[in-house]
Amino acid sequence: MYNNVTAADIAALQVIVGEADVLHGQAINPDYAHDELGGISRMPEVLVRVHSTQEVSAVMKLAYERNIPVTVRGSGTGLVGAAVAIHGGILLETTKMNRILALDENNLTVTVQPGVLLMELAAFAEEHDFLYPPDPGEKSATIGGNISTNAGGMRAVKYGVTRDYVRSLTVVLPNGEIQTFGAAVAKNSSGYSLKDLIIGSEGTLCVICEAVLKLVPLPKISVSLLVPFPDMKSAIEAVPEIIRSKVTPTAIEYMSRDTILFSENYLGKKFPDTKNDAYILLTFDGNTDAQVDQDMSTVAELCLKIGALDAYIVDTDERKKSVWSARGAFLEAIKASTTEMDECDVVVPGNQVDTFIKYTHELADEFHVRIPSFGHAGDGNLHVYICRDTLSDPDWEQVKSDCFDRMYQKAVELGGLVSGEHGIGYAKKAYLRRQYGETPIALMQGIKRVFDEKNILNPGKVCF
């Protein structure tokens, strides 16, 4: 179906980006064969590190003419195999396209290349008294990757997800043509929103080379509240009550004692409280002490009234760092606690979070396997991990398959979806197809064909 990369192709790629940024054969680090979880593995034939939109265009023109598959990769922090070159070919790495190009303080926008890290953009915005609201847990992910998966993160309750902050995208199409979709304006009702098709498309439609992103003024005050509960049921049941109180926290995260202990061991740092079974971690922000204190007091009193054991204010820099660094390390901490793991990234209605989490506990008992979880309780996005521990290869594959089948089916039954923010990639295609059925998948495939008639850009992912 596709052509292999030849010596002539490698020479042509070296002319485009420079010899030092074209690696092939044994020169490619084996880490490029997989993403963060490593469950899907395939080495590319050649790794190409690009520095500019023009270089991306030239690489795509070559690939288009030669019918060579191209997979785009940022930091490789994905969890579903979307950045794995399953058909070989060219792995196009964008981490060297890492410049913040412009800040427009009048229109509250920032223009960035795709290789800028989330933590770099967040720091840049804060230095200029702005906030870039999307806040996924993996701060070393690239902005291009965040856009490609429509990442959400912890502040989605109040501020929304990545899609809500993308004003325009400059992209390279599979044939090498450079186009800009959207504009640096607040409203756009000018035809189909091609920009929004690209957001969340996981590198299957085009290569993102530049993005104009919306910023908001940086809130002057931010305080967190750590609320322990006797069990996960009471913790999760508190979330709809918080939302109905008409207070809008910036974040509402849930976590179990076991997950916190994993994080403590992984980081070598103590969490403020680990004696209770379940916790909700909330953040409130605003521009006056009175506003933030009122919101926080309302929620604290509500939680205590409905069964919380305490409410700890996290207002010093040291305490904030302790709590949020632990929360940010949950994925790596669970990973470090087992021999192998795989992830279920579902989203369910907020009032069904407890039902779904209880179901994962039932599965853990039924299959005699650990299934820790954490997630964004405020928007129903749950991160659930199946841990291999000492299971043999056949048992692991069977347990993993059975648990995933049951969990994704349960999410659909509860009115949810098979991915909240990590995407479909290669690993979750069957579950997407099962949920949506023939017509929606056919429409997605039709969109893919319009953008990429030769199917050379990240083939075999999402809907194929």
Image (tube, rainbow, N blue to C red):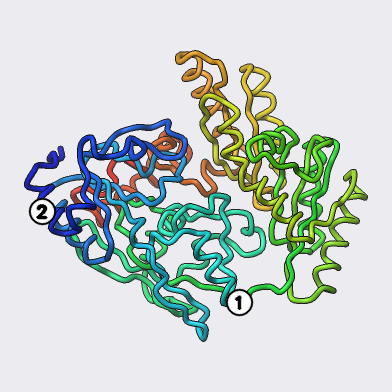
The reply to whether residue 404 is in sight is yes
Q: Mark 2: few, some, or many residues within 10 Å (few <14, many ≥20)?
A: some
69 sits left or right of 97 in the view: left
432 sits left or right of 234 in the view: left
Tell me which label, 2 or 1, sits earlier in the chain. 2
- Towards the viewer: 160 or 356: 160
Q: Position of residue 314 (x, y in %)?
A: 79, 56
Please identify the quadrant where the N terminus is shown.
Answer: top left
Residue 412 figure quarter: top right
Q: Residue at x 48, y 39 (%)?
A: 435
The numbered dot on residue 256 is none
The numbered dot on residue 129 is 1
User: What amino acid is labelled 2 in the image?
Assistant: Ala
In the depicted structure, whether residue 428 falls above or below residue 67: above
Q: Position of residue 223 (x, y in %)?
A: 76, 62
Q: Residue at x 49, y 78 (%)?
A: 186
